[in-house]
Image: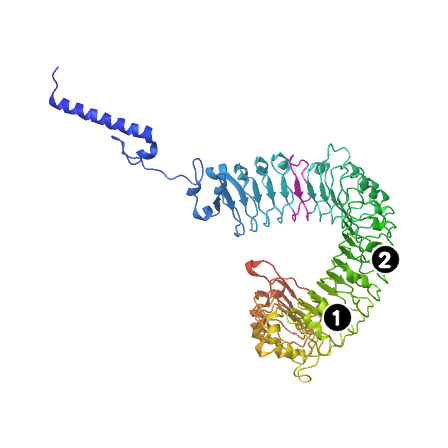
Amino acid sequence: MLFAPQNIMLGWDSVLLCCDVIVYNTVAVIFGDKETKGIRMPGRRPKEDKPPPPTGPGSRVEALPDVIRRHVIPITSGLHGFELRFSTSSVRSLPAEICENEELMNSTYLLDAPNNRLKRLPQTIGDLECLESIDVSNNAISSLPASLADLQSLSYLDVSNNSLRSLPSGLGRAPALTDVRASNNRIRSVPMKLPSVLETIDLSQNDITKLNKSIYRIPMRLNVSHNKLASLPPPVGVQGPTIHDIDASHNRITSLPSGMGNLGCLTSLNLSDNRLAELPAAVARLRYLRLLDVSRNCLSTLPEDICLLDWSLEELRVAGNQLRQLPAEFGRFRRLSLLDASGNGLQELPVDFDAVTSLQVVDLSRNQLVDVDAVVKLHSCEQVNLSDNEICRLPDDFDPSSSLVSLNASRNLLTHLPDTLGYIRTLKHLEAAGNKLSELPGTLGVYQLLATLDISDNRLESLPRDLGRFRTVETFSVCGNQLSVLPRTTDLMAALLRLDVSRNQLTSLVLPRCVQSLDVSGNPLYTEQEDPKGSLMVRLGDVDHVRCLTELHLSHLDLEEFPPVVTSLRMLTTLDLSHNDIDRLPQRLNRLSNLRRLDLANNSNLKSLDGIAVLAQLEWLDASANDIDKFSADLASLRWLQHLDLSDNNLSSLPDNFGQLGFVSILLQFVCLHSINSITTDLLFCRWAGNRLALCTLFDVTN
């Protein structure tokens, strides 16, 4: 058969085309699609790639608008996925696209949006099926979507500090939810059914008036403090209660329900600040209980059976009740490490009190104790507070091998301290203020490394000559005594940071170089004219003090002017010049550039605050009880000012724009504004940045 030449040519073209197709497919099979991207398929036109949509099927994160995508953070470790972070962004609502983007719906594990202005969460939040953690605390959310219960992986939910009135009724369906934080809302009730694996739920600071028995099935911790509970539900009939920790403090509970002993797994029970008049004996059946706090109730006795918790109880807090005595068998406790029985009417301790050798912290302050010998015998005790009792003497047989670190015997009737106290090598903090001490034991500080020594408000006329033994003391308070001179060895107290010698009879003093806080108020100190070289008002200008002093109290010194030397103390943050006769502010006030707190109260000759604008960092100012008759415009320049007290002055008017002044951020107090003829509406509606109400006013206006 003969073929025409043109047919032969067409045949060869077909053969070549088939060869090209074979080569293309072979490359695709061997090297994959990536190697064929640059090869053009013969006989086909190239397809144009369409960008993925931002929402709907096939949507990708890369297609989202930039304003949303910047909040989508890829997870860089391990699992591929994303975190949605909107924290402190001033957003009023979450963008709907995050719940409609397919890539986010399938791989978002965390939603973090606290500190915003959110009023609600998207109803479709349940579509983010991989969510494990949600934090939307500190917003204005009034309700939660029911779809939260559909999140199969959600384990952590924080909705605290919002405006919620309830939790979703279907929350119990969330299979993985272990931790719920919903404090500081307006929640009035708890869902009947809670998640089966829930371990911790915080419902504190709400309006809850009643609980149901299901709470006892929570394996770990329940916090319903600061609510309006009048009682707890009886645990009778609850199968296998597993709750470990209950905090029901700051409520209105008057009695505990029957069957409390059935909570066999309970290890911590906090019922402080309620109205309990009796503690049931059934508490003794809580054999694993380690902490019991019934402070600030109306208890007059403790059940004797409480001593049956001898091998479990570690902390017992019964402060602020009406107890006259502790249980007679108190000595049975073997693991008790902390006892707080302060603020009761205890007159004596149990006979076997010293048998509780495990005690490490004992607070028996604000009672009526006279004999505390048993406390001294607790060799393992590290902190003892015996203040505000009727103790006339401390025992003389302190054991040198004692573990005592801190002893507070302030405001008793002590006339002396025992010498053996100075042999306790572990003692670091000694407070004996408000007694009748006339001298200190010669052994004190010799064998110890004291850090705190407070012997204020006693009858000391002199201090030991060698203060070098207090070389490690950081806080030394001898205010309210009868000291007329300090030993020259005061400068040997090389570690001294805080020195209070106020309310004595000192005319001068030696000031250690390292002091950061100094209070010399109420002393008849020599002025610069009376003692040009030795006056404190001259010595404060020494280079060492200029570098170190950050807090200075010079009240009740009859100062007629702002001490010039004070303006050289550039590191000062707190200055008290109250109760003097200062009539004006100095010209060099700008040197105190670090000053945060200034007290000028009760300087009856002070008429103006002009010039105070140079204290740019000032946060707290008290200029009450002066002769100020005009609101200084300089106050408006203090942008960090948080507290201003101009009470008891002669102000007759306030500026019309007072409410718009931006310097008040927390508290502005005007008490007894005499002769105020008019108060502008702005004063009652002062607002701060962001139009958030930030002014609290207290008025006692006398015209």
Q: Is residue 221 left or right of residue 688?
A: right
Local crowd size for mark 2, using a 10 Å CA cut-off: few (<14), some (14–19), many (≥20)? many
Please report whichever mark, 2 or 1, sits nearer to the chain's N-terminal start: 2
Q: Are marks 2 and 1 in contact (CB under 8 Å)?
A: no
Three-letter code, disc 2: Leu
For marks 2 and 1, give the CA distance: 26 Å
- Residue under circle 2? 369
Query: Does residue 450 sit above or below 355 in this rendering?
Result: below
Which of the two residues, 645 or 698, is positioned nearer the viewer here? 645
Q: Is residue 156 visible?
A: yes
Query: Does residue 202 sit above or below 363 in this rendering?
Result: above
- Residue under circle 1? 479
Q: Among all residues in the image, which is located at the extreme bottom?
A: 529
Secondary element type, mark 1: loop
Does the magenta segment cover residue 335?
Answer: no
Does the magenta segment cover residue 189?
Answer: yes
Q: Give the percent coordinates (x, y) of residue 202.
A: 66, 44
Q: Residue 18 got which mark? A: none
Q: Give the percent coordinates (x, y) of residue 661.
A: 57, 66
Q: Within the image, what quadrant is residue 445 found in?
A: bottom right
Q: Give the percent coordinates (x, y) of residue 51.
A: 37, 40
Q: Is residue 33 left or right of residue 509?
A: left
Secondary element type, mark 2: loop
Three-letter code, disc 1: Cys
